[in-house]
Image (spheres, helix red, strand yellow):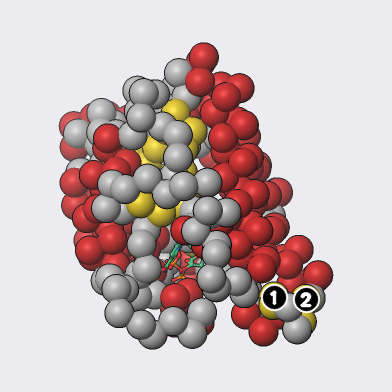
Amino acid sequence: MMKLIQSSIILLILALSGIANAETILITGSNRGIGLGLAEAYADRGWRVIATARNPGRAEELNALATKYDNLTVDELDVTDNDEISALAKKYEGTAIDVLLNNAGVLGDIEKQNAQNIDYDEIKFIMDVNVYGPMKMAKAFLPQVGASEQKKILTMTSGLGSMTLTQRLGRFYGYRMSKAAVNMAMRAMHADLKGEGYVIGLIAPGQVQTELLFASGFRGPGSITVDESVAGLLAVIDSVNAETVGLPINYDGQAIPW
Ligand SMILES: NC(=O)c1ccc[n+]([C@@H]2O[C@H](COP(=O)([O-])OP(=O)(O)OC[C@H]3O[C@@H](n4cnc5c(N)ncnc54)[C@H](OP(=O)(O)O)[C@@H]3O)[C@@H](O)[C@H]2O)c1
């Protein structure tokens, strides 16, 4: 009885603050880089933001956002941990999630994924995070996304996963494979679930000045800031729908070939 009263009070507070009626987004890997930028931007827009991080205790910038915005909460989630995924899905049972954004990703050790050195354990690790993580998240959160207005499950891919664009420069085998594989997984899932109204698509952030890009050794021109990427991604996420979902869409609205 006490629990029922407590939940009713929480719902009342949320309703009064407008949060209960707001659109909701769940973002993986929100403690830094593009995920952190997206979490802030959505909180600023008034969305309810479920921001997840592997180590919330060390997520200082994200915790600062949670202090600043009532509509942003932080949850612990390692996307390779099945138990954590199940526990989070259970926690949000009955919550409509408009956008599930599989942002978390790893580049892996670039010295272990080239023609001179192929380390299969490293490649398996990259696949665990970049492919099986998003697949497990998508499956676990189908009810919550299905209960929402927008029903979007979007996964961050990369031009490095494009067969067409991989002509002159190779390297990053595991990372490239993971992004090509997650493209196919999400494409297949969309084919299966589009009839139920789901929009399961792929988006890409551009070459963004984050730890991941710096670890790739890339220092060339053409890279953009997190803020520039996030501004473009918001427009892409807003506009993707049952009619437009297909090829991965870059932050600038351009389609990336398979
Ligand atoms: N930056 C680019 O130029 C670029 C280009 C194309 C695509 N992308 C994609 O964009 C996404 C975000 O990348 P970013 O540039 O923002 O990279 P980043 O700064 O390295 O951030 C990666 C995020 O993923 C999280 N993460 C890693 N492994 C995880 C796991 N097992 N479970 C949960 N979270 C995990 C990290 O958390 P910890 O802090 O705990 O490690 C961090 O929050 C990735 O999917 C990446 O492949 C980036």
Q: Are marks 2 and 1 in contact (CB under 8 Å)?
A: yes
**Which quadrant of the view contains residue 90?**
top right
Which residue is depicted at the point 60% across and 30% down?
A: 189
The one nearer the camera, 211 or 180, is 180
Residue type indicated by callout 1: Gln
Relative to 153, is 22 on the left or the right?
Answer: left
Position of residue 144 measured from the top left corner of the image (x, y, whole percent): 49, 29
The one nearer the camera, 242 or 13, is 242
Cα–Cα span, label 2 and label 1: 5 Å
Looking at this view, name the residue that lies furthest to the right: 120
Relative to 82, is 69 on the left or the right?
Answer: left
Mark 2 near ligand 1 (CB under 8 Å)?
no
For residue 13, which numbered disc appears in the image? none
Q: Does residue 28 appear in the picture of this structure?
A: no
Which residue is depicted at the point 45% across and 40% down?
A: 247
Which residue is depicted at the point 37% across and 58% down?
A: 205
Residue type indicated by callout 2: Ile
Q: Does residue 38 appear in the picture of this structure?
A: yes
According to the image, label 2 marks what residue?
118
- Dot 2: element: strand
According to the image, label 1 marks what residue?
113
**Which quadrant of the view contains residue 139?**
top right
| Mark 1 neighbour class, 10 Å CA radius: few under 14, some 14 to 19, many 20 or more | many
Up the image or down, 247 lies above or below 150; here it is below
- Dot 1: element: strand
Up the image or down, 6 lies above or below 46; here it is above
The one nearer the camera, 19 or 238, is 238
| Mark 2 neighbour class, 10 Å CA radius: few under 14, some 14 to 19, many 20 or more | some
Relative to 158, is 13 on the left or the right?
Answer: left
Looking at this view, name the residue that lies furthest to the front: 168
**Among the two numbered marks 2 and 1 on one chain, the one whose residue lies closer to the N terminus:** 1
Position of residue 136 measured from the top left corner of the image (x, y, whole percent): 65, 43
